[in-house]
Image (tube, grey):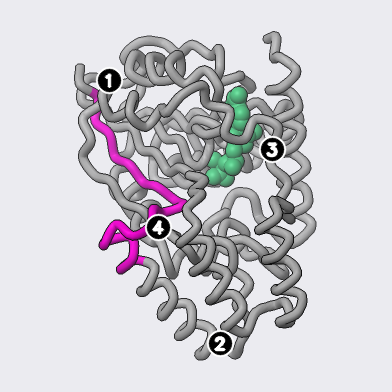
Amino acid sequence: MDIDQTSQAEGKYWENVISTLQNDGLDFRTREDFVAKDPKYFWEDGDLMKMIMPYPKAFLKSQIKPGMKTLDLGSGSGGNSYLMAKLGADALGVDVQEENIRYLNQELKKEPELKIRFEVNDLNVATFPENQFDLVLSWNSFHHIKNTDHLIQEIQKSLKPDGLFILLEHQHTHSMFRKALGAFFWLLLPTRERFMEKFQLIRGRAHGKSEETLSPAEDSADHDYLDSLKKAFVLEDERAYLGFTGPFIARIRAGKGLKSFLVKMVDGLDRAFIKMRLIKGEQLFLVLRNRK
Ligand SMILES: C[S@@+](CC[C@H](N)C(=O)[O-])C[C@H]1O[C@@H](n2cnc3c(N)ncnc32)[C@H](O)[C@@H]1O
């Protein structure tokens, strides 16, 4: 299939991320148990994710019944597709990473008992057969898609009546209050960086310098797709995580007990601020039911 230049660059970018993490000890099929050697961000630390947001994965697992057909949009390293297949689903993972998909399909030959396949496709233009899937998943992939109206229509069309669309999504939040809280706790807590280094990094961020490189199609959606999603589907659940802690929580360094205490403390505060609607969460979890 023809994949445009931006989507190709996007695929290459994520292939590089996966191989860097793989060199750091990632087992791509058990993403849940993955922890990078020296994680900088929450998404590089599987243990931390389990501590602060266990619900999305637990909910996903609870929805999988043997024989159901699932579609994983932007399946990346394949962890969620494997998870669903291991629970008995007939799983399809779709991504724009051509080399990685070849690799995953090769690896699958070692586990012929699993009903799983990966396909290369660009979600900006991909079409799916009608009434096929019981569950569609997008795990931190949707915000890389430009043509979101098209994708929403395809999800609705391909879901069976009453089928479920599960969305975990990364939201950039630009609130000054959130940034100030993040900077305060980052400076205060023991982290992988020393005080002066943190100070320089925070100053750099305030002047628009980010240490995190963004993927070529990051936040490329052509409009606010969350509104469109809520109109197109029936919203059954909405949760948010990581209000101000996202930039530093994975960087906390202390003995095991103290680290766990500090993580729980800032995460508890974070949840309270989100609940009081003082800040928005960086990670948004939505459960959407098809209207058909
Ligand atoms: C942040 S990663 C998430 C990967 C995976 N869902 C996970 O949680 O590990 C975003 C994924 O979206 C994929 N992606 C980005 N743009 C895409 C497009 N236009 N079509 C298909 N996949 C795309 C990337 O290749 C990447 O695997």
Q: What's drawn in magenta, residue-wise?
A: 271-290
Q: Nearer the viewer, residue 107 or 169?
A: 169
Of callouts 3 and 4, the N-terminal one:
3
Q: Amino acid at mark 3?
A: Ser
Q: Which residue is mark 4?
A: 241
Dot 3: what SS? loop
Dot 4: what SS? strand
Q: Which residue is mark 3?
A: 215
Q: Position of residue 85 (x, y in %)?
A: 45, 40
Residue 182 belongs to magenta span: no
Q: Nearer the viewer, mark 3 or mark 2?
A: 3
Q: CA distance from mark 3 to mark 2?
A: 33 Å
Of callouts 1 and 4, the N-terminal one:
1
Question: Contact, CB < 8 Å: mark 1 with mark 3?
Answer: no
Point out which mark residue 256 bears.
Answer: 2
Q: Quadrant of the C terminus?
A: top left
User: Quick check: 190 above or below 166?
Assistant: below
Of callouts 1 and 3, the N-terminal one:
1
Location of residue 120 by image quarter: top right
Residue 285 belongs to magenta span: yes
Mark 3 crowd level (few <14, some 14–19, many ≥20, 10 Å Cα): some
Mark 4 crowd level (few <14, some 14–19, many ≥20, 10 Å Cα): many
Q: Nearer the viewer, mark 2 or mark 1?
A: 2
User: Quick check: 81 above or below 259?
Assistant: above
For ligand 1, give the image quadrant.
Answer: top right
